[in-house]
Image (cartoon, rainbow, N blue to C red):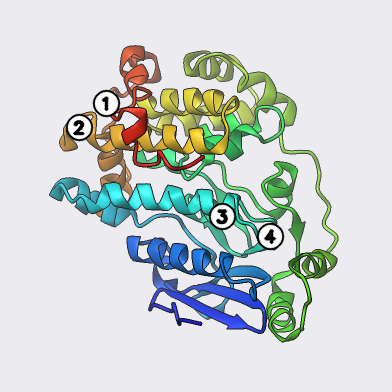
Amino acid sequence: MTDLTTADVVTEVHGRLACITLNRPKALNALSLGMVRSLTQALQQWQADPDILAVVVRGQGKEGPFGAFCAGGDIRFFHQAAWAGDEALGDFFTEEYALNYLIHTYSKPYIAFMDGIVMGGGMGISQGASLRVVTERTKMAMPETNIGLFPDVGGGYFLSRCPGHIGEYLGLTGHMMGAAQALSAHLADGFIESGRLANIWQKLISTPFETGQAVEHWVRSQFGRLDVPAFPARAQVDAVFSKSTVSEIIQSLGNASDVWSQETAKALRQRSPLMLHVVLEQIRLARRMGLADDLRMERNLVHHCFHLRATSASETVEGIRALAVDKDHAPRWQPARIEDVDLAEVAAFFVSPWPSDAHPLAKLS
């Protein structure tokens, strides 16, 4: 088999098992365009190879395998490419979303070991897995509103399918979850202690499995016991985040005096007001969509994020500047208040810039 290894993505075949290690630990395995292409090439080749039974994926931590999965996309690249007018920015999102679709619809077991940080693009390459494994070190979130973006990579699809209105809560606030909350939100399938991962990986690559289902069954048999209580403040999450508008959500939180409501309102007040409105609409629309249509909608949205307004007025470019470039953590959102968002501007995000037959993701079925 052709060696598909690059510096940032290590691919190996052991017997009939294909293995992926994301290998960019200093950047917490944040995805570059080259990594997206390497992953796509490997998965397409393995899907067509009858000798390959299953695929397993992990991240390389700073001290060795595991410890970090993937922190998302390379947002510094997004910022630079936006200012430079680099067409590679559009290519990144088109190819990343196509990769997300490939994983969700993969014809063989694809098992993701989500140890450590799993955010944004990391969720995109794990939520479509046939088995999603979390550990006591898992830190899972879709924190895009913090940088003036929205939960993409199929986020509308998988967040909208969380129980109740947990998806709206996670998408709007960017709340970070550990293993138990991820399981409660139906964003993970099982728990394995991180100290066991190295031995489990070794067992996987040394066992002569006969079917992909046998690989998946064996990993499932390794799941440990974990107390999974109800999602925190579940009744309040459902009551508040079922409101029709972001303004109603923030008003409901403001009318309450409990700690959860105050902290949630504070978090929302720090996010991009415009993108909060966009995200609520995204998740509500995605609840009635299949994956392909959701990804096409998200490709429209991300085009608008970087091209609807001038780069100097882009919420996403400004959010990345504040978080990762200047690091002043003081984004200048336009408008600054949730109550001042023009709903016509929100609606414009959902108008596709392409006719359906010319959409970059038109081939997704």
* Mark nearer the N terminus (3 vs 4): 3
**Pointer 3 residue:** 103
Task: Note whether 148 is above or below 23 in the view shown.
Answer: above
In front: 91, or 357? 357
Residue that appears at 49% across and 33% down: 293
Q: Nearer the viewer, mark 1 or mark 2?
A: 2
Task: Note whether 1 is above or below 86 in the view shown.
Answer: below
**Does residue 130 appear in this view?**
yes
Number of the label disc, if any, that sits on residue 313: 2
Residue that appears at 76% across and 83% down: 208
**Does residue 328 appear in this view?**
no
Callout 2 amino acid? Ala
Q: Nearer the viewer, mark 3 or mark 4?
A: 3
Residue that appears at 39% across and 14% down: 339
Estimate the spatial distance between the alpha carbons at disc 2 and disc 3, rounded to whole Å: 34 Å
Q: Residues within 10 Å of mark 1 (few under 14, many from 20)?
A: some
Q: For this view, does 345 lie left or right of residue 104?
A: left
Q: Residue furthest left?
A: 84
Estimate the spatial distance between the alpha carbons at disc 4 and disc 2, rounded to whole Å: 38 Å
**Pointer 1 residue:** 334
In front: 256, or 2? 2
Number of the label disc, if any, that sits on residue 181: none
**Pointer 4 residue:** 134
Specify the quadrant of the image occupied by residue 18. Answer: bottom right
Callout 4 amino acid? Val
